[in-house]
Image (cartoon, grey):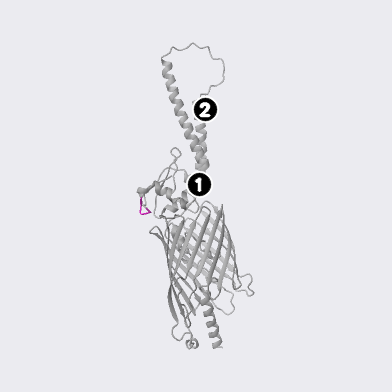
Amino acid sequence: MKWIKSLFMLTIAFILQFQLYSTEYNSFSAEAERLGKNVISASGKPYIMFSNPAGLHNLAVPAIFADYGLLYPNLTDGTKFVNNTIGYAQPIFGGGLGIGVNQFGVKDWYQCDTFVLSYGRAVKEYLPQLKLGTKVSMLKESYVLDDYMKQSVVFSKFTEKSVFNFSLGLQYEMEQILLSAVMNNLLQPDLGFYTQEILPIEIELGGKYTTGKLNLYFSATVENNVKKDYTTSFSIEYGVVIFKQLKILPSVTVSFGSRNYSMIHFGFSVQTKQVAVGYSYTFDPLQKVDTGGQTRVSISYNFLPVEVEQIQIPKKELEKLVKEKEELTNQIKTLQEELQKVKLEKKELPAPVSEPVTTTEKIVSPEEELQEKIKLLEEKLKELEKKKPATVTQPTTAVSSTVTPTTKKRYHTAVPGDTLPKLAEKYYGDASQWKKIYEANKDKIIRGQIVPGSVLEIP
């Protein structure tokens, strides 16, 4: 029976070597898995370093993350899979740098460690909407063998092998659409122990459309193996903010592809200013045997707070009120000058004899009417400020933005981790509008970097 066990383990080894790098294998984090391994699902988060390095371009602050995967717990043969990930990401050189490691395998028998170094940034000088990234990976496979398997031809020379791999990624941002592409296995390393097994070049495409609180995702992966394999997925995600500090994003995804591949993914993400927790559960609806599916849990921590969601006073309403108040203020000023001139002229004339006023009706001057209108407008502005004070404050050393209604100017005091796209996203809701802030503050930005402590004008 010993040889049967050895043969069974050897068969799993070849299956794992294919599945580990095929389109059917699971992703490195719950955040990506719950959206069908979408290569843009975790944009701006540290775990994006494993899927699309271009997503590190808008990393706001240093962050660390960890992920735990529980795969197929109901297997009757006692096989236990190990699938854990940890990583760290840091804003640097106008972009984001990520370092991470994933460990996958069958406990006490097979193990594959993937070490990743990723970097991504925006191409500000040429096309602000375009983000590029590169990823270098080292894959290390190793086996723990019994006496029988040591005699196998497959493992006669070695039981451990390491290779390097290289990938490229890009993202393109528009107003409501985000597009993504990744090309993996560009070096096409040979992972075979006994025969040559070159990893095929793999192309991953992704898209995200945002409308209100709803996010729609699409992804497709194609690899040119013995025959072309593909997978596609469609995801729906809905985001809500509660207590002004907590953002919850539940999601559901359907995936299908070649070789009878089909998966349904359920999950959610819970985010605060510094902590994000992701959960995903994936199962095959067509599978006859209950393997227990795949469960993943991810957690990330930002070393500095990041706003969960920028809540702003409606711009049109605020601009309308400010403009109307300025017009009325100018009218008051003009009227006061005219009244002053009339008073001077009256001093030079004898006082006219007038009949007693018998009416009890109060006479309201034009100036008083305008002042009353200004008072009402100021009360409206104060009500808006009470509801959303983060956007109508005086310039301070805090992170929040400032809006001075009388001058229509806003100011922002820079803190470590601030970038132009991040500020554009915060104040305009569109990261591609960073150039407006750059043009207004050229003297305070050194080689594209914002100096912490400097006060920037937000046009």
The residue stretch that appears in magenta: 445-449
Q: For mark 1, what is the residue?
A: 312
Q: For the residue marked with disc 1, what is the amino acid? A: Gln
Element under label 1? loop
Q: In this view, does 87 lie above or below 399?
A: below
- Residue 369: in magenta span: no
The rendered magenta stretch, by its main secondary structure, is classed as strand
At horizontal 47% and vertical 12% (from top left) the residue drawn is 352
398, 157: nearer the viewer: 157
User: Left or right: where does residue 458 sit relative to residue 365?
Assistant: left
Residue 205 appears anywhere in the view? yes
At horizontal 45% and vertical 22% (from top left) the residue drawn is 339
Q: In which quarter of the image is the C terminus?
A: top left
Residues at discs 1 and 2 in contact (Cβ within 8 Å): no
Q: Position of residue 246 (x, y in %)?
A: 52, 55
Element under label 2? helix
Query: Few, some or many C-alpha atoms within 10 Å of disc 2 (few <14, some 14-19, many ≥20)?
Result: few
At horizontal 48% and vertical 31% (from top left) the residue drawn is 328
- Number of marks present in the image shown: 2
- Residue 447: in magenta span: yes
| Lower sequence index among marks 1 and 2 | 1
Query: Few, some or many C-alpha atoms within 10 Å of disc 1 (few <14, some 14-19, many ≥20)?
Result: some
59, 301: nearer the viewer: 59
Residue 34 appears anywhere in the view? no
Q: What is the CA distance from the residue labelled 1 to the residue labelled 2?
A: 31 Å
Q: For mark 2, what is the residue?
A: 369
Q: Where is residue 202 in the image (x, y as percent from the top left)?
A: 50, 69
Q: Position of residue 43 (x, y in %)?
A: 49, 60
Indicate which disc residue 226 carries: none
Q: For the residue marked with disc 2, what is the amino acid? A: Glu
Q: State which quadrant residue 70 falls in.
A: bottom right
